[in-house]
Image (tube, rainbow, N blue to C red):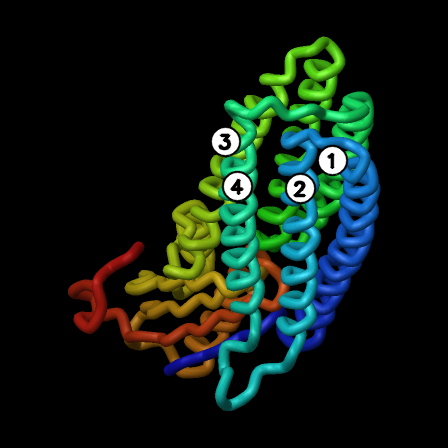
Amino acid sequence: MAARAEGAHGHTHVSTFAASTGEGVWALKWGTAGLAATTALQLVLLLFSGSVALLGDTLHNGVDVAGTAVVWAAFRLSRRARSDRFSYGYHRFEDFAGLFVVVLILAGAGLVLFESAMAFGHDREVARPWLALAAGAIGFLGNEGVAQLKIRTGRRISSAALVADGLHSRTDGLTSLGVVAAGIGLLLGATWLDASIGLVIGLVILWTAWGSGREVILRLLDHSDPVLRAELLGVAVTVPLVAHVNELRLRQLGRTVHVVANVCVPSDTPLGLAHDAAEALQAAWLEDLPPGSVVDIHLDPYYPNGVHAGHPQAM
């Protein structure tokens, strides 16, 4: 016997998922606008300065604008209904968008490191160093505001891609503080500080790529969250007639989780009661899962001599 549940028995979880997608698109829309404005202001100031640290920060912020736009597009694509060809839906677009953002971070880091390394050994004159200081302050304030918006929204709707993009924005804000330090150094005559901070910015960006990229890659490899797995197994023991969970598989697709489980009920349980037990377990699990998640349950008979022979015991 097999049973399947998507959302929370009909429209409740479906509408909740649509609402969470709307929140994500809203956050990305304003995030893109904020980052674009920040980058435009920095670009104007860069034209009147020669700071390599400011050049790297401005270029990286521009890459971040592109990355935010990609995640925004992924949110819109994930709203498409499932089809026969894409029976799991289009939620994986969000994971690929997160991966693309990581690639953009790496490209930005490479560019910053290259420009900073080239600045060493060259007597580069930086005009109006106070402009670099002002541009760094603008970069920090703009990026931190956008980061707060995206991280909070991403955590509320369980979107790893949006959280990763928010962490990227936060790192941009911190690196902008490095530009402020470079501007102070330039005002004091320490021209070497500009290239040095550029190198530090590049290394910080690389560290961010590792942190956000690891989570995205694990999702693409169908890594199972051990905490969520333990929670689901703990819930199962509270459902009447559920004797064992023989097999439990979790797959993260964007903000959703697809659960496939083989569950044992006593072999002498009437069909109707066994079906009710599966329904109760599905409802209980969906309470712990993000909106839009799917639960597939296959029921196996449990005999007095032990677990159903077809599957290894998981609980």
Sequence-wise, which precedes: disc 4 or disc 2?
A: 4
Tag 1–tag 2 contact (CB < 8 Å): yes
Q: Report the mark closest to the observer, 3 or 1.
A: 3
Counting other residues with Cα less than 10 Å from the Cα at mark 3, is it few (<14), some (14-19), or many (20 or more)?
A: some
* Residue situated in front as seen by the camera: 41 or 284: 41
Residue 119 is drawn in which quadrant? top right
Q: Report the mark closest to the observer, 3 or 2.
A: 3
**The residue positioned farthest toward the top in the image shown:** 188
Counting other residues with Cα less than 10 Å from the Cα at mark 4, is it few (<14), some (14-19), or many (20 or more)?
A: many
Amino acid type indicated by mark 2: Ser
Sequence-wise, which precedes: disc 4 or disc 1?
A: 4
Amino acid type indicated by mark 1: Glu
Q: Tag on residue 117?
A: 3
> In the rendered view, does 42 fall on the left or right side of 115?
right
The residue that mark 2 highlights is 169
Sequence-wise, which precedes: disc 4 or disc 3?
A: 4
**What's the CA distance linking mark 3 and mark 2?**
24 Å
What percent of the width, then of the height, locates residue 299? 36, 75
Amino acid type indicated by mark 3: Ala
Tag 4–tag 2 contact (CB < 8 Å): no
Is residue 301 in sight in this rendering? yes
Q: Quadrant of the C terminus?
A: bottom left
> Looking at the picture, does residue 96 appear above or below residue 268?
above
Q: Tag on residue 109?
A: 4
Q: Tag on residue 144?
A: 1
**What's the CA distance linking mark 3 and mark 1?**
27 Å
**The residue positioned farthest toward the front in the image shown:** 123
